[in-house]
Image (cartoon, rainbow, N blue to C red):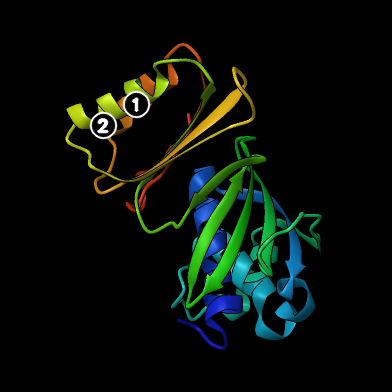
Amino acid sequence: MVEPSSSHTAGAVKIGYVARRLLGENVVSADIGLYGSFLATGKGHGTDAALVAGILGMKMDDDNIPNSLKIAKEKGIKVRFGKADIKDAHPNSVEIKLVGENGRQLSIVGESVGGSLINIAKIDGLDANFSGDFPTLIVHNQDQPGHVAEVTGMLAEKSVNIATMQLYRAGRGGNAVMVIECDQEVPGKYLEWLKNLDGVNKVTYYSLIEEGENEF
């Protein structure tokens, strides 16, 4: 990792990197809201540069991390920093809102929990809570019977083992989210199949393969 801090620097790079991969296309603008210790002491630890480095696609050991703000400016990427309005968040938290070159938008809340480990707490305002260490499937759907069985059945049929699975919902019959960390990558054509299921609002996939992720 690039110094000085595993939480304020390395973890911040990883949060930005995961956000960029979830967006699935080159970034044209980034609104970054800092919270807690990230806001109070992040500047001295290079947290701002670290977050932007991740958004540019750099990893934690990239020597160009300290130059990321300059590189983003040269690429014409609009970067704005401010204070995040997050309730009861981890002290090292950031809200990142990205716009991609094809108009795709993504909002995440990321937490740097120490030792370069992170948690993606929210995606587009909905609970997520995943580490970025596994291929991760996020399905936003209507809270209706059968959706969990459809998704887990598809993964079993394709020999994709589930490492962890979390379910969230806003209320009975409302919006729900499945967050599934997998031991294997999920092939793109099956993500497309999920997208077309009745009652599925959105499918987001985080891949560990450089060009393997897509949002449908």
- Dot 2 lies on which element? helix
In percent of the image, x 72 and y 86: which residue is there?
A: 44
Image quarter of residue 34: bottom right
Q: Please state which amino acid type lies under the numbered disc 1.
A: Val
> Whole-percent x and y of residue 24?
49, 43
Q: Please state which amino acid type lies under the numbered disc 2.
A: Leu
Task: Tell me: residue 120, above or below residue 8.
Answer: above
Front residue of this view, candidates 168 and 52: 168
Which residue in the rendered view is the most extreme toward the top?
198
Which residue in the rendered view is the most extreme toward the front?
172
> Whole-percent x and y of residue 202?
52, 27
Asked whether, in this view, residue 9 is left or right of residue 157, the answer is right
> Whole-percent x and y of residue 212?
35, 44
Asked if residue 56 can be seen in this view, the reply is no
In percent of the image, x 71 and y 78: which residue is there?
A: 42
10 Å crowding of disc 2: few (<14), some (14-19), many (20+): some
Residue identified by numbered label 1: 151
In percent of the image, x 25 and y 49: which residue is there?
A: 183
Task: Tell me: residue 68, above or below residue 119.
Answer: below
How many marks can you see?
2
Image quarter of residue 159: top left
> What label sits on residue 155 in the rendered view?
2
The quadrant of the rendering that contains the N terminus is bottom left
Image quarter of residue 180: top left
Tell whether label 2 touches label 1 (CB within 8 Å).
yes
> What label sits on residue 193 in the rendered view?
none
- Dot 1 lies on which element? helix
Front residue of this view, candidates 149 and 51: 149
Asked if residue 42 can be seen in this view, the reply is yes
10 Å crowding of disc 1: few (<14), some (14-19), many (20+): some
For the residues marked 1 and 2, what is the alpha-carbon distance in whole angstroms?
6 Å
> Whole-percent x and y of residue 101?
61, 41
